Amino acid sequence: PQALSEIEDDDLVRNSRDGVGELCEGVLKRVGRLVQLRKEQNARLKQSELRRVWASSLAFASSIERATGEPAFALRSALVAQARAFLEKRHSDAKAALVACLDAERWAQADVTPERQSRLDRLSQGLTNDEDDTTNDVTPPARDKRSLRAANVEGRTYKCVWSGLVLLDRILDALGAAAAFPVIASEATACVVDLARFFESRTRQLVLFAGALHSSARLRTITAKHLGLASQSLNLIEALLPHVRAA
């Protein structure tokens, strides 16, 4: 009877372990499926909101892995796909905003507010913000020509046009996504490069090749001042790119 009891105990433990494993596997599949089904909706969340979803899901996956001793591949893969979809949506929106700003750009100096300069200073130090987007405002504010401030990077000043500042905001957003979700860091870097190249190419078309005469800005002529501001805006982006790679 003693031996029989030990056998029954072993069977009970084994059956319980198998039951827990099957239950955990089923729950993991359902949670992973839920994340997949909400892929498009979650891609439109604020970064802080998606981080909460990410953190909760990862904590759940880790708990299941400890209980079963098996990796939660399905859920972790779904979370990676979700982060990539979030970055793709953000990049698509960033490029659309940049297209609109460049098309309406009048190639006049924009004011670099203390808030923007603070973000530039953080970037120059290799620091990024992993919270929500910097700003969604792509409409240039009213300009007071008497108090326009230039950007400062490592002691050098750069006058910048409004679309250049919008580009900087979107670069910081991409770096923030990389900080929040390190698994997509390489994709975020590629997004930054793509935005910078697009800005450089479109600026050349609009200013050097006089495309701004036919854009929605309808400039009457391209002046040396326009050329100078375009050049300084490009120089500002070039000065920040090494810090982007470091961040």
Image: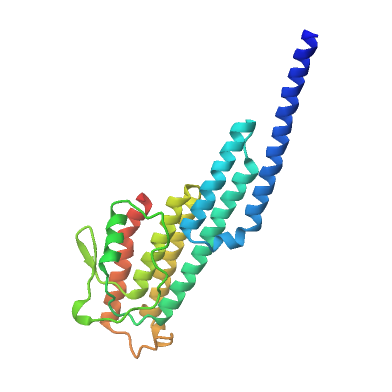
Residue that lies at the very extreme toward the front in this rendered image: 1
For the point 36% across and 65% down, which residue is it? 168
Of residue 144 and residue 44, the one placed in the foreground of this image is 44
Residue that lies at the very extreme toward the top in this rendered image: 2
For the point 33% across and 68% down, which residue is it? 234
Q: Which of the 4 image quarters holds residue 8?
A: top right
Image x and y of residue 39, in percent: 61, 58
Residue 92 lies left or right of residue 24; in this view the side is: left
Q: Is residue 92 above or below residue 185?
A: below
How many circles with numbers are drawn on the protein? 0
Q: Is residue 71 above or below residue 187?
A: above
Image x and y of residue 24, in percent: 68, 38
Of residue 16 and residue 85, the one placed in the foreground of this image is 16
Residue that lies at the very extreme toward the bottom in this rendered image: 220
Image x and y of residue 26, in percent: 71, 42
Q: Is residue 171 above or below residue 78?
A: below
Image x and y of residue 35, in percent: 62, 53
For the point 34% across and 69% down, which residue is it? 165
